[in-house]
Amino acid sequence: MDRRTRAIYEAHAEYWIAHRGVDAEARRQLRAFAARLAAGARVADLGCGPGWFARALAARGRTVLGLDLSRAMLREAVRAAPRARLVRGDLGRLPFARESLGGAWAKNTYIHLPFRELPSALADLARALRPGAPLAVSFLRPNAARQSARLARTGWAELRSRDEALAGRLFTLLGEQLARDLLAGAGFRGVRVRHGERLWLTALRARTLSDSVRPGLELLVVGLNPSPVAAATGVPFAGANNRFWPAALRAGWLARDRDPADALRRGIGFTDLAKRVTPSANALRPREYRAGAARVARLVRVLRPRAVAFVGLDGFRRAVDARARPGPVAAGFAGRPAYLVPSTSGRNAAVSLAALVRHFRAARRLARAR
């Protein structure tokens, strides 16, 4: 969470609690969310505050983990939700084991993360949920024409509240399309949006590979789709015979093998044209490539990496240009320079590791030329 926002909630928890409550819209959403939970599911109330929703979920027979970064809020939650297990933690670094949760509720909590941290935080949330587990998360809707204009132009906006007692809190607003795209990229399926006082999104955890992205990347790497091994490990291009990581290390892109988190810190991000997991990309349908290319294009326009590198020609040819060849893309992609790298699969024996290294170095030069 934004540090300034955390300090405000710590100092003014009593004021916030006295002037807030559970409104009818939130009650409806909570009932709908609870109905989707499996019997006895372990569910997280993320940003639980004083424990109002944790109490309601526990009363429905669920094992509830309430997480908040504010000690003052957790002290109130102990009294309000004595049956919940309370944890002090940050939404950006969830202290939960992989696939340990059967559901997650997050009302107006991810809004306090800076946009730069939001994609990784949503991916971390997906990691903690079991496949098929439901999610309900809300974002604020714009309350001014200038905010609406910013969302229409960029898809997101950050602002500081001017509330007299709670002034300075960070709020991140998302447009509907970007919210959908970020959830799909993080590893969710069946994303649905409901409009009310807030923007409510519900989804199910998919068995797929989460994106590893943020604004300001040097290079966004776009694969075809995740393999079962990549989905299971959380590492793109994770197949034993895939030469992506050896080539990226030799080309100087990366310093650590099979470590997407370290790659992200170094400005290398990952996504896929299609998020559906298959043993072979040949199982994908052309419309999946086209829909995926549209999502990636929207992502590129929002995140604005210095360049985009597509790994594997087949997807780009099916979705964008049937005559595309390895090397720089003359027209770029979504307004950024783009490079096509041949497939790094070990099945692509026609392209040597040395040739892949040359392509990777050329892609990096393209990014650094801007």
Image: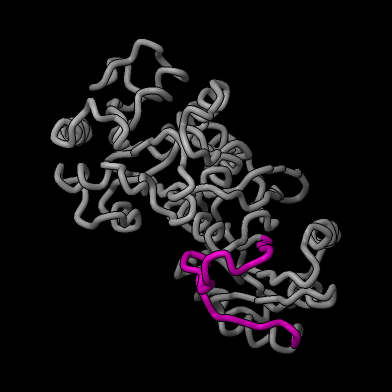
- What's the residue at 69%, 72% (across, down)? 42
**Residue shown at the point (57%, 50%) measured from the top left:** 207
Q: Position of residue 146 (x, y in %)?
A: 57, 38
Q: What are the residue bounds of the magenta stretch?
A: 82-107
Decide which of 31, 370 is in the foreground and name it: 31
- As displayed, is residue 351 above or below residue 179? above
Residue 235, position as x, y percentages in the image: 39, 52
User: Is-magenta flag for residue 85?
Assistant: yes
Q: Main secondary structure of the magenta part?
A: loop
Closer to us: 279 or 49: 279
- In the rendered image, residue 164, in percent from the top left (x then y), is placed at 61, 67
- Above or below 285: residue 175: below
Q: Seen in the image, is 123 located left or right of residue 300?
A: right
Name which residue lies at 78% across and 64% down. 38
- Asked whether, in this view, residue 73 is left or right of residue 62, the answer is left
The quarter of the picture where the C terminus appears is top left
